[in-house]
Image (cartoon, helix red, strand yellow):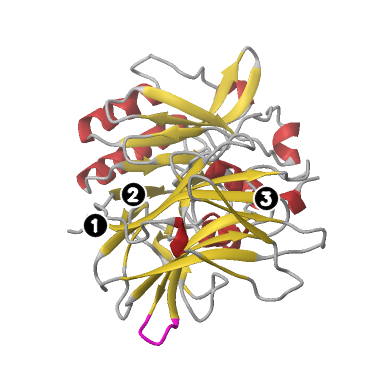
Amino acid sequence: MNTSNLLPNAESFTTLSPTDAQTPVFFREDGGILGARRTDRPHCFGKWAARAAVQAGTTYTAAVECRVDEMPKRIGPKDNHAYALLNWLNKDGIYLRREYLEASPKKADSPQEWLRLFCASTAPQGAVTAELELTLCTPGTVRWRNASLSESAPLPPRPVRVASAFFEPRRDLARNLETMLALAEQAGQMQADVLLFTESGYDRGVAPIQAKAVPIPSAAPEDVLGQLGAKAKQYNCNILVNLVEDEGGFYFNSTVMLDRSGQYIGKYRKSHLPTVEKEAGFSPGNELPVFKMDFATIGIMTCYDLVFMDIGRTLRSKGAEMLFVPTIGNFMLCSQMLARETGMHVVLSGSGPPHPSRVINPNGDIIASVDGAADGIAFAEIDLAKGFYSRETGFFPAVSNARSALPSQQRHELYRF
């Protein structure tokens, strides 16, 4: 494997812009820095680009450091006005695939901070040339340095065996818990890495609210968390379960995470409550946390949260790689759009017809589903290292990776209130 840089110096980069009116001020600085600055015109679009010969089927890693300066106050460092692309071309110079370089290990927290971007990808069939493209898309000033493209080892797979429970809860805590334990057994026999239960699967319909609320975390081995924790440990499976949480007389719709040893590791309190839940005595959560599990960094959204796509965008910006959604409702279109907008797998646990449990890939395709009269498990083995390539990503006829394309094209400065 040849690990030398195929783009050894900044002199190999040339500038491109579609029209004279849009052309920014391109400049070079000491240390191999390439820059582009907006003119006094209202719009600009321009790029630095360099190409190198590649071999189809070989894996390459593209990397570059970026710094964005002189942005208007309404625009922050996460607003995608400067981006880098790794493009693959065939012998006729036609783009086959175009992929965004993403932040590693994190987004810039402030302007004037150098941010490393990278993309590891296998050259597609028919590719003979790779192009690294460094773009300014109005406004401000962007600087690039330390661009590289080199052969690398193929990305190792990141398999995750996902189970989403499906059953229709009754107004009986003991019976619901019995059903959940049986489904945990079933998921365990499938060797699932993670099992998601539906919203209020343990306590739906039980009233008043005080009768079903529990403290979280709880160490009592006989309660719902204790018994599910024992199943988690028995089958080496992470479990996510939704409960009514009691904290000093305030009640929350909370989803709890238990690790493979059955230990409590965190909770998410439903942040967007329908009016009927407020009137029933629930309080909203005020945080959108992500959780580093042993298989991925995950975010959680609960039922009505699905209507608000900003939650998913926020969780992705915080590093989430998968979303888990316990829900009473169906929200089929919202759940598929959530997967598309965020470029993440969405695992949803429904409860009773017509509210199926399902697993959705970043293209918005349902890859596992269960619905009907019988209890069951929607099960899928996914690979978090696998790209999901689609023409519906703004590069037609070339394809791009759905995991990063739409999130990288969002204009957050327009969405702020």
Q: Give the residues in magenta.
A: 90-94
Residue type at the position of mark 1: Pro
Residue 162's label in the rendered image is 2
| Residue 140 seen by the camera | yes
Q: Is residue 114 above or below residue 39?
A: above
Residue lying at the far left in this picture: please name it: 1
Disc 3/disc 2 C-alpha distance (Å): 44 Å
**Residue 362 visible in the current orientation:** no
Q: Give the spatial CA distance, label 2 vs label 1.
A: 24 Å
Q: Is residue 327 left or right of residue 372?
A: right
Residue that mark 3 sits on: 141
Q: Which amino acid type is marked by label 2?
A: Val
Q: Is residue 48 magenta?
A: no
The percent coordinates of residue 100 (x first, y second) are 48, 59
Amino acid at the residue labelled 3: Thr
- Return the disc, 3 or 2, that comes first in the chain's sequence: 3
Dot 1 corresponds to which residue? 154
In percent of width and height, residue 332 lies at 56, 61
Q: Main secondary structure of the magenta part?
A: loop
Q: Nearer the viewer, mark 1 or mark 3?
A: 3
Q: Is residue 372 left or right of residue 200?
A: left
Residue 314 figure quarter: top right
Q: Would residue 321 appear left or right of 39 to someone viewing this image?
A: left
Question: Which structural element holds mark 3?
Answer: strand
> Residue, x 24% and y 42% (percent of image)?
188
Where is residue 278, by image quadrant?
top right
Whether the residues at callouts 3 and 2 have beta carbons within 8 Å, the answer is no
Residue 362: % across, % down: 46, 60
CA separation in Å, label 1 and label 3: 35 Å
